Image: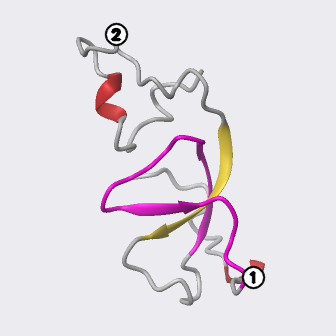
C-alpha cells in the first residue's frame, strides 16, 4: 500500500483525509506501486533542455494544472537532456 506522504500533491489526495466516504484512504492506494516516471511542467516545451526530470511516484499519481508524468521519455529526448539538478527534489 502506498503511504499518505507519497500521495501528497495528487489530484485524488483529498480522499486520504480522515472523515471522507472512503474511510480515510484513496481507493487506488491499495494496489498502486512506486514507479519511475519523467515529470514535465504542463506549460514547458518538451524540446527545452532540462524539461524532463526523473522522479519516483505512485503508479496512480496525477496532477491537475501542474506536472505531467510520462512512463517513458519521448523518442526525441536524449538522456543527457534530462534535468539532473532537481532529481532528488520533492514534489510540490
**Discs 2/1, front:** 2
Report the residue marked by disc 2.
Answer: 23
Q: Report which quarter residue 85 is drawn in.
A: bottom right
Report the residue marked by disc 1.
Answer: 80
Look at the image and say whether residue 71 sits in the magenta stretch.
yes
Q: Indicate the position of residue 11 as horizontal and vertical percent values.
A: 34, 44
Towards the viewer: 46 or 83: 46
Look at the image and say whether residue 32 sits in the magenta stretch.
no
Q: Report which quarter residue 66 is drawn in.
A: bottom left
Judged left or right of residue 47, residue 26 is left
Judged left or right of residue 15, residue 2 is right
Q: Residue at x 25, y 16 (%)?
A: 20
Q: Residue furthest left?
A: 19
Asked if marks 2 and 1 touch (Cβ < 8 Å), the reply is: no
Label ID, residue 54: none
For mark 1, give the secondary structure.
helix
Q: Residue at x 46, y 31 (%)?
A: 5
- Above or below: residue 23 compared with residue 26: above
Label 2, residues with CA under 10 Å away: few <14, some 14-19, many ≥20: few
Judged left or right of residue 15, residue 44 is right
Q: Residue at x 50, y 28 (%)?
A: 28
- Above or below: residue 19 compared with residue 81: above
Q: How does the figure colour the protein chain or chains?
A: secondary structure
Residue interval drawn in magenta:
52-75
Q: Who comes first in sequence, dot 2 or dot 1?
A: 2
Give me the C-alpha separation between circle 2 and circle 1.
44 Å
Amino acid at each position: 500500500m502506498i503511504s499518505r506522504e507519497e500521495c501528497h500533491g495528487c489530484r485524488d489526495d483529498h480522499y486520504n483525509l480522515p472523515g471522507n466516504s472512503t474511510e480515510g484512504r484513496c481507493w487506488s492506494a491499495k494496489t498502486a506501486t512506486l514507479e519511475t516516471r519523467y515529470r514535465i511542467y504542463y506549460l514547458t516545451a518538451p524540446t527545452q533542455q532540462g524539461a524532463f526530470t526523473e522522479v519516483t511516484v505512485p503508479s496512480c499519481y496525477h496532477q491537475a494544472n501542474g506536472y505531467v508524468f510520462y512512463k517513458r521519455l519521448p523518442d526525441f529526448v536524449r538522456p543527457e537532456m534530462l534535468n539532473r539538478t532537481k532529481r532528488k527534489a520533492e514534489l510540490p
